[in-house]
Image: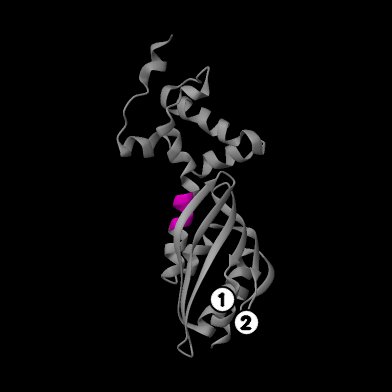
Amino acid sequence: MDEGYDRFGSYSRVEVERFFHLDDEDRRLVARRRDYNRRGFAVQMVPVRHLGMFLPDPLDVPLELVEPMSEQNVSTMRNTYEAFNRADIPAVLEAFDPQIEWHEPGGGSAPQGDYHGAESVANDVFSTIPEHFDEFEARPDGFIDGSEHLVVVGVFHGKSKAGHRMQARYAHVWKMRDGKAISFNNHVEAAPWAEGWSAS
């Protein structure tokens, strides 16, 4: 076997981020593949970049070196929730595809229905929050990576204009493509959500 194939070994975090991170150009290339082989294609990019050759068997790439690639959607959305909770809406919108499809269940005065595009989400969903709440956060408890889909579970915390405290559990289902969110569904605990949005 060519000695180049034996060059996988132990890596520092800096080396992992250097060789096993997919940048925007990589993601555009991966996105041109069919849904069922995108991850496999991404895995093959690793040895080409680092060793200058393809591996006969992609499974020869150590799992611990593949995992950082699959974690990029989690990292992106973790940063997005942090931005949302500090009210940095421009940073939140950076994670969205411009044509994102967004669904809200409604309840009380909460936004309800389907919203098309990041601009609509900002103007028709996010802008309603400070109208009804003095405090509002979506605190994530866990991220479940399903490749194209990412599920985030957590709790909404809010304080309405009338002083009512809200806590409502949620499960957010995101669909990701090329490192951007292309769809979102807000599954939220109905009773406390409606009560919170009715107490302003």
Residue shown at the point (34%, 24%) measured from the top left:
9
Magenta stretch encompasses residue 77: yes
The residue lying furthest to the front in this view is 191
Q: How is the image coloured?
A: one colour
Residue indicated by mark 1: 193
Given residues 63 and 53, the one toward you in this image is: 63
Residue indicated by mark 2: 108
* Image quarter of residue 123: bottom right
Residue 177 in the image: x percent, y percent?
60, 48
Task: Give the class, few, some or many, for how many residues have Cα within 10 Å of label 2's Cα (few <14, many ≥20).
Answer: some
Residue 158 in the image: x percent, y percent?
46, 78
Magenta residues (range): 74-78
Q: CA distance from mark 1 to mark 2?
A: 8 Å
Residue shown at the point (50%, 59%) measured from the top left:
153
Label 2 residue SS: loop
Circles 1 and 2 in contact, beta carbons < 8 Å = yes
Please state which amino acid type lies under the numbered disc 2.
Gly
